[in-house]
Image (cartoon, rainbow, N blue to C red):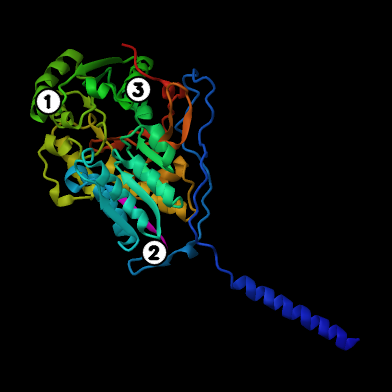
Amino acid sequence: MEKKRLKVLSFILIFALSLLMTGCGETQDNSAVTASPGITDETKNGDGNQDDTDNTNTAENDNSGNTDDDNDSENNDGNTTDNFHIGIVTGSISQSEDDRRGAEAFQEKYGAENVTLAIYPDNFSDELDTTIQTIVNLADDPDMKAIIVNQAVDGTTEAFRQIKSKRPDILCLAGEAYEDYPDIGAVSDLVVGNDFLSRGYLMIHTAHELGCDTFVHISFPRHLSYESVYREVAIMKAACKKFRMNFRMETAPDPTTDVGVPGAQKFIRKEVPKWIKKYGQKSAYFCTNDAHTEPLIEMLLKCGGYFIEADLPSPLMGYPGALDLDLNWNTGDFGEIQTTVENAVVERGGAGRFGTWTYSYGYALSAGLAEHARNVILGESEMNSIDDLSRAFGAFSPGSEWNGSRYTDAGTGKKSDNIILVYQDTYIMGNPGYYAGSTKVKVPGKYFKMGEPEG
């Protein structure tokens, strides 16, 4: 009997030891993890008529990331080396410098062995086949897990369609899409653009906080036909009414017409003094065209008035030319760039009247989308989480804050799960300067449903 008991005990001990050794020897599955679509962060907005109770751009707390540091191994630079590749496609340095610099910053962080960069043609509309093939070729890498295109020019939708047909495991992310949202959204895991909906309200809010009584919108018919522009105008009009401000529109020459960029800029320089006389020193100005931005800032510094931020804000948008600054020595260091621009603005008497985003939108979009894709693959983020997306953008824009909203169809009022519009907190330059707190302001839900403006 005693021998039998000892035999049983020995068997139990051996069995327990084998279980323990098996548990210690298990390895975790490091295959790519793709977040399921349909994750929402906003509360439902009823009929959208409650002016100050709805807020569709409040960031959520998904708490969905489960990190596992064992998934990464350290390289000599202290950065993590992953067993997957990420591809980033941008325009060239000559056409889209900030977009390209952002891609290079991500590659520098994680290594050229993990991050592949590509460039679509400068004349992408005329070289559509080349553009498509440039994007699709990245899928030939068997370790490729995510492809980001910024800016997502014409041809990106077809390229993503081809990639998904042969490599459905690859995540496809589009930044600042040229093609219609419903089309590119149907073949993308995530589409991210400039939040023209929230910003239509927030720019007016900031101008009001600065004491402005009039907001002047400068554009031309071609731009006014774009959804992002005519819906933003509608929101700006309504916001001005709420804050008891005047909303005015001025027409400037389209730089793509016969007058060209020189003619369009000459017009702005000539008209700004007249506008300031007409609308007063407490008027704020916004233009939809990059070529108009430099002369507008230049003349507002001389004549008075306010400039909240550019259409695609950056300390490099309009300010270097308006202030006659040479920033070629400081490529990519936005902390130094912002300081240099701010000091020059203050010296010209512009403290408290001029704003920007402290980091270039194009730079942050390239690097931030790639960082977000990496986090999703590692299981640390949800693809459609605004909080997680903002966190990824913040990794390449320290000190600034991001927020956003889901794209809302003006006709149906339906929000898109995988099309997210983002914005950065507005920085008002001064001595000292300060962040306006735009990302903390609640945008009433009804503004997201506004369509084409009356008249």
Disc 1 marks a residue whose amino acid type is Ala
Mark closer to the chain start, 3 or 1: 3
Q: Closer to the camera, 256 or 5?
A: 256
Would you call the spot at circle 1 few (<14 residues within 10 Å), some (14-19), or many (20 or more)?
many
Q: Residue furthest right?
A: 1
Q: Amino acid at mark 3?
A: Arg
Q: Which mark is residue 81?
A: 2
The residue range painted magenta reads 82-88
Alpha-carbon span between mark 3 and mark 1:
24 Å
* Residue 394 in view: no
Asked whether residue 60 is drawn in magenta, I would say no
Q: What numbered label is drawn on residue 231? A: 3
Q: CA distance from mark 2 to mark 3?
A: 43 Å
> Which residue is painted at 32% across and 62% down in the image?
111
Q: Which residue is mark 1?
A: 264
- Magenta stretch contains residue 84: yes
Residue 382 can be seen in this image: yes
Element on which disc 2 rests: strand
Point out residue 118 in the picture as x, y percentages from the top left corner: 27, 52
Q: Position of residue 25 (x, y in %)?
A: 59, 73
**Which residue type carries mark 2?**
Thr
What is the distance, in whole Å, between disc 1 and disc 2 at their CAs? 49 Å
- In the image, farthest residue toward the top: 455
